[in-house]
Image (tube, rainbow, N blue to C red):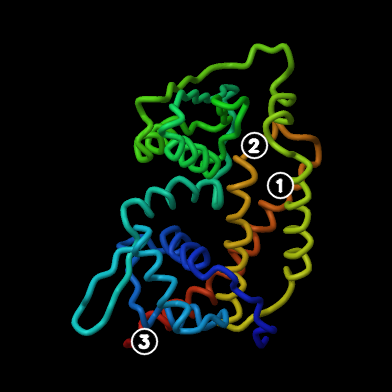
């Protein structure tokens, strides 16, 4: 089946990071791609050569990618910082689902107003990890992510200003009430339902190799956005008939179905000499 009218990629840098993250999940290795390969792969999404070169240059400046020369060709691979981010996010995208141990992780901080830039960066990075504010300077997470939070605090220069805890919630409300207080469950559920509706109607469609590659990357890119909305809330903490469960099942089924053709397209595109 021919590729449909291309859905526009509005943020090439974010989409290229999705590409590298999915590549890391499936391929491993040094995650190195030539500039020519990146241009070919992103061309399947209608992204121009100029936009790709501008995006990777920005990602190098932001220390997500590292540029290196091999003869007359430029290659780009994920930096150590980028790999840490991929390793932190991948389990929440690809699974496996881990049962909740009943314990909450907590981070408190005291950052002076003169260091508010570090405080803001800390908050932003904690949100990426799936943490949410219980109060202005106290953040919580149901997942076992204390070490990731420690690394974040250290990376923003605020490790001396934080304290980390793990324990159970003793009330006066219940664990589900705590979740409803810290996360917007209605907004998360709505986003999951939109994902389900969009992908369920595409389940039975057939695609050629390029089409399967485009579908797979959009699937991962769309599903990856949930790591910024949902910390992977366990079933014990969400309402009955939670749409996130259906979304996860559809994601994994579509990802597996699209795998062989999309990988063939990827390998063909990256093996062509630049």
Residue at image point 40% right, 25% down: 161
Q: Does dot 2 land on a helix, a strand or a loop? A: loop
Q: Is residue 209 visible?
A: no
* Structural distance between the alpha carbons of marks 1 and 2: 9 Å
Looking at the image, the residue that sits furthest to the front is 114
Q: Which mark is residue 126?
A: none
Residue at point 71%, 46% (across, down): 245
Label 1 close to label 2 by CB (< 8 Å): yes
Counting residues from the start of the chain, the first of labels 1 and 2 encountered is: 2
Q: Quadrant of the N terminus?
A: bottom right
Compared to residue 244, the image places residue 36 above or below, namely below
- Between 265 and 57, the one lying in front of the other is 57
Q: Earlier in the sequence, mark 2 or mark 3?
A: 2
Q: Is residue 153 left or right of residue 131?
A: left
Provide residue 22's location: percent of width, then percent of height. Answer: 48, 62
Closer to us: 2 or 181: 181
Asked whether residue 128 appears in the rendered view, the answer is yes
Q: Residues within 10 Å of mark 1 (few under 14, many from 20)?
A: many
Q: Which mark is residue 272?
A: 3
Q: Earlier in the sequence, mark 1 or mark 3?
A: 1
Check disc 1 and report the residue beneath it: 244
Q: CA distance from mark 1 to mark 3?
A: 39 Å
Q: Is 154 in front, or is 42? A: 154
Q: Is residue 233 left or right of residue 116?
A: right
Q: Quadrant of residue 111?
A: top left
- Mark 2 highlights which residue? 233
Residue 28 spot, x, y in % from top left: 36, 60
């Amino acid at each position: 089946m021919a590729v449909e009218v291309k859905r526009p990629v509005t943020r090439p840098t974010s989409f290229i990071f999705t590409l590298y993250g999915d590549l890391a999940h499936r391929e491993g290795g040094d995650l190195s791609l030539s500039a020519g390969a990146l241009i070919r792969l992103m061309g399947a999404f209608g992204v121009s050569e100029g936009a790709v070169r501008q995006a990777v240059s920005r990602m190098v400046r932001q220390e997500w990618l590292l540029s290196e020369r091999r003869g007359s060709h430029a290659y780009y691979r994920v930096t150590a910082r980028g790999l840490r981010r991929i390793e932190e996010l991948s389990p929440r995208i690809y699974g496996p689902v881990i049962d909740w141990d009943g314990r909450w992780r907590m981070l408190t901080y005291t950052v002076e107003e003169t260091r508010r830039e570090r405080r803001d960066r800390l908050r932003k990075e904690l949100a990426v990890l799936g943490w949410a504010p219980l109060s202005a300077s106290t953040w919580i997470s149901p997942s076992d992510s204390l070490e990731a939070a420690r690394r974040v605090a250290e990376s923003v220069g605020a490790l001396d200003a934080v304290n980390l805890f793990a324990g159970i919630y003793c009330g006066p409300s219940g664990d589900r009430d705590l979740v409803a207080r810290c996360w917007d469950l209605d907004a998360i559920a709505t986003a999951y339902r939109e994902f389900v509706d969009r992908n369920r109607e595409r389940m039975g469609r057939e695609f050629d190799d390029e089409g399967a590659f485009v579908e797979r990357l959009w699937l991962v890119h769309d599903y990856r956005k949930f790591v910024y909305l949902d910390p992977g809330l366990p079933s014990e903490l969400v309402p009955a008939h939670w749409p996130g469960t259906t979304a996860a099942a559809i994601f994994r089924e579509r990802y597996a179905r699209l795998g062989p053709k999309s990988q063939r397209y990827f390998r063909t595109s990256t093996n062509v000499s630049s």
